[in-house]
Image (cartoon, rainbow, N blue to C red):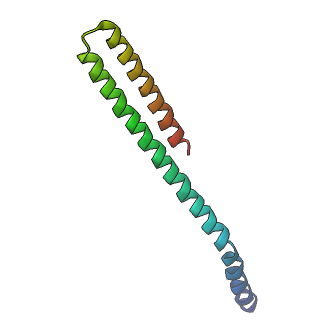
Amino acid sequence: MKKFALVLTPLTIVLAACDGPAEEAAEQQDDINEAAAEVIDERAEMAEAHADLAEERAEAAGDSVEEAKLEQHAEDLEQKAEKLEDRADGM
């Protein structure tokens, strides 16, 4: 039985090594996906910052029509940011 185990052990190691390139490729793809998700997440943060700026401009606007436009723009940017965050989370 020990001789059988001694023969199978190197064979098992060789077979396990065959998964090396495939495993490495999968890890590289995971790294790429993670980097892409980080980029999308940064875009979401930028959209949120633009939304905050639009809200501040709306508060400073003297004209109610201009204020309403800026508030709508801010809301649109916030929705865009949420979609981007959801997309990044899904990666």
Seen at 40% across and 33% down, the residue is 47
In the image, farthest residue toward the top:
64
Which image quadrant is residue 41 in? top left
Query: Against 25, is 13 above or below?
Result: below
Marks counted in the figure total: 0
From the viewer's side, name the closer residue of 63 and 41.
Answer: 63
Question: Does residue 84 lie above or below 7 as drawn?
Answer: above
Judge from the rendering whether residue 64 lies leftward or rightward of residue 21; answer left or right. left
Quadrant of the rendering where the N terminus is positioned: bottom right
Residue 21 image position (x, y, % from top left): 65, 72
Residue 12 point in image, percent of width and height: 70, 80
Q: Please tell me which residue is depicted at 70% across the width and 76% down the height of the picture.
A: 18
Percent position (x, y) of residue 5? Answer: 72, 86
Name the residue at 74% across, 92% down.
Answer: 3
Q: Is residue 28 left or right of residue 50?
A: right
Q: Residue at x 24, y 10 (%)?
A: 62
Quarter of the figure with residue 23: bottom right
Image: 37 above or below 22: above
Q: Is residue 25 left or right of residue 78?
A: right
